[in-house]
Image (cartoon, rainbow, N blue to C red):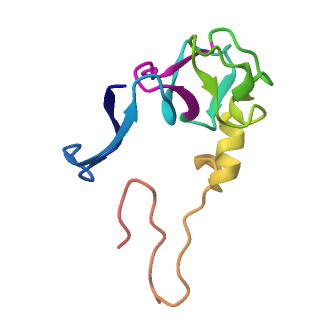
Amino acid sequence: MPEVRIVAEPRTEFGKGAIEHVDLILVRRGEKVTVEVPIQVTGEVEPGGLLDQQMVRLAVEAEATQIPQGIAVNVAGMEIGAAVHAGELDLPSGVTLAAEPEALVLHVLAAPTAEQIEAELGEVPAAEEEATVPESVPGAEAATPDEPAG
């Protein structure tokens, strides 16, 4: 049987994207290989939802000449609490899942409110802020937000 060479893992130069090195695998035509392919997300989740993608590449098994460019996942209209697991993905004909079927690919969370974000960051609304004078600087004046002290 004729042999086929496939790209196993191209390595790019960090920050530049230029290909630095390419590993090739030699396989026989018709032989199945296990490879990781990108997960391609399309669509928008329901308003108020936040997409949390846990997996960006998926391990699949396919014939060396039939490796898909990626696996599409349409999230259009997904509601808060919805999830997609690896075993639920639609794979092309001749492609089988090599990952755990229960592996979480993505799910939709409730988008945080402005108040939740502020609380997490430890920010205080501007109306509650007070200018303070350091005690170690005698004669110093408090600075207002728009003008320097002095």
* Magenta stretch in the rendered image: 58-75
Q: Is residue 4 left or right of residue 33?
A: left
Using the image as rendered, state which of residue 48 and residue 90 is in the foreground. 90
Using the image as rendered, state which of residue 71 and residue 25 is in the foreground. 25
- Quarter holding the C terminus is bottom left
- Residue at the extreme front: 1
Using the image as rendered, state which of residue 10 and residue 128 is in the foreground. 10
Q: At x 65% / y 56%, what residue is drawn?
A: 122
Residue 121 % position (x, y): 62, 53
- Quarter holding the N terminus is top left
Q: Is residue 22 left or right of residue 141?
A: left
Residue 15 % position (x, y): 25, 50
Q: At x 57% / y 15%, what residue is drawn?
A: 94
53, above or below 74, in the image: below
Using the image as rendered, state which of residue 129 and residue 120 is in the foreground. 120
Q: Is residue 72 highlighted in magenta?
A: yes
Residue 7 % position (x, y): 33, 37
Q: How many marks?
A: 0
127, above or below 38, in the image: below
Q: At x 60% / y 37%, what residue is drawn?
A: 55
Q: Is residue 36 left or right of residue 146?
A: right
Q: Is residue 135 left or right of residue 50?
A: left
Does the image show residue 85?
no
Residue 81 % position (x, y): 80, 25
Does the image show residue 140?
yes
62, above or below 58, in the image: above
Q: At x 58% / y 20%, what residue is drawn?
A: 95
Rendering quarter of residue 77: top right
85, above or below 130, in the image: above
